[in-house]
Image (cartoon, coloured by chain):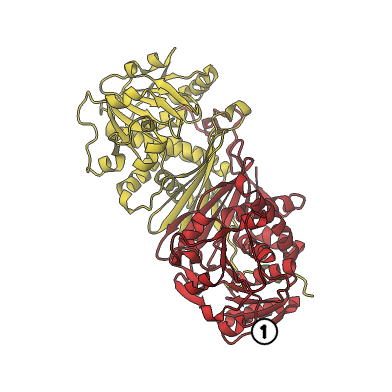
Chain colours: A red, B yellow
Amino acid sequence: MTRFVDVRNMVRWAAARGPERILSEMVGYVEADFGRWEEFDKTPRVASHTPYGVIELMPASDSETYGFKYVNGHPSNPAHGFQTVTAFGVLADVSNGYPTFMSEMTLLTAFRTAATSAMVARKLARPDAKRVALIGTGSQSEFQALAFRSVLGIAKLSVWDTDPAAVEKFVRNMAPLGFDIAVAPSAAEAVRGADIVTTCTADKAKAVILSADMVEPGMHINAMGGDCPGKTELDPAILDRGDVFVEFDPQTRVEGEIQQMPADFPVTEFWQVLNGQAAGRTSADQVTIFDSVGFAIEDFSALRYVRDAVATTDFFDEIDLVANPDDPKDLFGLIGALVPTG
Amino acid sequence: MTRFVDVRNMVRWAAARGPERILSEMVGYVEADFGRWEEFDKTPRVASHTPYGVIELMPASDSETYGFKYVNGHPSNPAHGFQTVTAFGVLADVSNGYPTFMSEMTLLTAFRTAATSAMVARKLARPDAKRVALIGTGSQSEFQALAFRSVLGIAKLSVWDTDPAAVEKFVRNMAPLGFDIAVAPSAAEAVRGADIVTTCTADKAKAVILSADMVEPGMHINAMGGDCPGKTELDPAILDRGDVFVEFDPQTRVEGEIQQMPADFPVTEFWQVLNGQAAGRTSADQVTIFDSVGFAIEDFSALRYVRDAVATTDFFDEIDLVANPDDPKDLFGLIGALVPTG
């Protein structure tokens, strides 16, 4: 039987364990996997693009465990009452290919994206960072805020979104949890004086959410919403203002903010910073930019973490996903026993 | 909610509907999809190879529906009590990216592989074909036999396998269903005088299951077991003796029997034969070879068929795979409502 965490169990488990504890524990798993980057079988995700959006499969594996995520991105979904991003994922045993664990990943992707942002910011933002600007207060925003507080201790936020109802929702969710939130009248006002800027919007277009004149010395920019061809958030001039860090170069060249730049535009894969093989932030005035598109290893880590964390709880079901005849060569026997003979 | 056909429901449904009815109905779906080949978004499958075997993701989509299959191939699995091939698959709505249907596909892959073999043989084998030789009597063999009877009316079989227990199992399963089965003492004996030869073995190696001297004029060879790099079944000389038909050229060049041939070795994609755009069998003496590796559109068709066929039955469950907050931008609200405020 395959263990399965459905939406109901994910919600119950997340509430019981606490989102901030989950985020800090998950950063441990993501960081451990980024730290052994070279052990992974890596491939850019396989994307199917349509005028409506994109559906992607994101596989990654080490020598013991294979994992993949199914994920969609449909920017116009919220206007029709649907989530922009939904996802589910599976882990399997490399030695026999059997799936062992399946989970909803709509919520889990929100957690893993925020955990990755916080992991990177802990390395690249100024150690004295005190305020995060959140541009975009959609589905991902609360998870970002909780990750920055849980992992970096930052509880001061300035927020902005084109949709006032989304801002109101964010404040309603986060103010009771003790955050100090300033609602800004514009993106520029939200960004002014911030130490970390997260851009997290969902237009499938070349947008300029952040322009070069808004960037101040020493800022860390966490650019998450540019994540497929034709979808960017940053004024390309910003990319020349700082040092750009990415997850997996071959994927980010196609999907990230750097799709706007020449093919030889210099970037650093973050795992090398983590392992001390490349420089991260080298001065307090330096602008650092995390051009985040989401990589399969992060999903692998998130699935590993949930699998381990729920193992000792009752927040999972078992599903009958793999046919398992007594004689492995007698697959037909499963049916044959029930078929009338003639 | 996502409809889910687990192993138990698949077994119950297959027995209730009848395997031969399923195979003939499924051929209709596969043929319909091959007939609109150019409408599909096609990509070679994404494979993760290890010394143990392979794990693959196989996506395909048209303008309305996206589908993918997870499938492994581990030749040494039966020695450890596991299936060589296990699989599951998903259909999703292209317009919003939401998964709508999930099914076990270990059994379903056996059905779809046999349905594809029969669809191709109906076009390429001699119309007067009376006997099928089955080389390899593992998990796939019964489904092949049932498909040839259901679709081509052939009930006369000669069979051979290196494993006598597998042959015995085949006879035990199929003889009561009215097949006329000759157990041959060798592959050569099984093949002699046969009109259609199916090779279906699982060694992950360059094997020669069928040698050129066994091939007779007019034979149709249904070569299914060569399906990943380094895994072939035919003496390459056979490929020069006849005309070779494939599913999807870019995938078969890497995975099929023709991996043994030069890059410009001529092959015909079967969908073109189906649509009258290319010649199939042109004479009674011609040797036709279907170098089958399994293509994502076949899984897409099989999933579509099962989704439609079970819709009016109770052979499915509903699973809670996609988080669906009332406000699509308030994903956190699903958890937040349960988190204590501080």
Q: Is residue A10 above or below residue B152?
A: below
Dot 1, crowdedness within 10 Å: few (<14), some or many (≥20)?
A: some
Say which of A29 and A177 sits in front: A29
- Residue sticking out furthest to the right: B342
How many numbered discs?
A: 1
Q: In which quarter of the image is residue A62?
A: top right
Q: Which residue is drawn at 60% across and 49% down?
A: A90
Would you name the residue on which mark 1 appears?
A: A182
- Is there any visible trace of residue A250 in the rendered image? yes
Percent x, y of residue A168: 63, 82
Which quadrant: the C terminus of chain A? top left
Tell me where residue A58 appears, x and y as whole percent.
53, 53
Q: Nearer the viewer, residue B24 or A328?
A: A328
Q: Residue at x 34, y 17 (%)?
A: B214
**Residue A295: x percent and y percent?**
56, 56
On the image, the x and y values in percent for residue A71 come to 53, 58
**SS category of the residue bearing label 1:** strand
| Location of residue A267 by image quarter | bottom right
User: Which residue is located at x 77 percent, y 71 percent?
Assistant: B340
- At horizontal 60% and vertical 53% (from top left) the residue drawn is A297
